[in-house]
């Protein structure tokens, strides 16, 4: 995933093979990106839902 601020200045490339939660906060004139807690669902919830609709989740593959 490519992140950049509205001015195109602060950029980051983020990859994750599993959940990746991010929190964006302002510190003065800068935006700070940090890890955030997983909310509202678990891996087990997602796996159960995927099985119900016939989808296989590859938990080891990096999503980009």
Image (cartoon, rainbow, N blue to C red):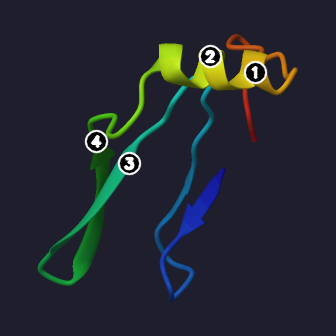
C-alpha distance separating marks 3 and 1: 28 Å
Judged from the image, the secondary structure of the residue bearing numbered disc 4 is loop
Q: Mark 1 points at which residue?
A: 52
Residue marked by disc 4: 36
Residue that sits furthest to the left in the current view:
28
Vertical placement of residue 26 versus 33, above or below = below
Q: Toward the viewer: 41 or 26?
A: 41
**Residue 12, numbered label:** none
Q: Does the CB distance between marks 3 and 4 fall below 8 Å?
A: yes
Left or right of 27? Residue 9 is: right
Q: In this view, does 8 lie to the left or right of 53?
A: left
24 vs 5, left or right, is: left
Residues at marks 1 and 4, CA–CA distance in whole angstroms: 28 Å
Residue 56: x and y, percent?
83, 16
Report which residue position mark 2 lands on. Answer: 48
Q: Decide: few, some or many residues near mark 3? Use Cα within 10 Å; few <14, some 14-19, many ≥20.
A: few
Looking at the rendered structure, the secondary structure element under dot 1 is helix
Residue 10 percent across, percent down from the top left = 46, 69
Distance, label 4 to label 2, CA atoms, is 23 Å
Q: In which quarter of the image is residue 55?
A: top right
């Amino acid at each position: 995933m490519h992140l950049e601020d509205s001015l195109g200045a602060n950029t980051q490339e983020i990859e994750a093979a599993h959940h990746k939660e991010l929190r964006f906060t302002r510190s003065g004139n800068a935006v700070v990106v940090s890890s955030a807690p997983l909310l509202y669902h678990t891996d087990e919830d997602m796996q159960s839902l995927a099985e119900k609709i016939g989808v296989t989740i590859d938990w080891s593959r990096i999503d980009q």
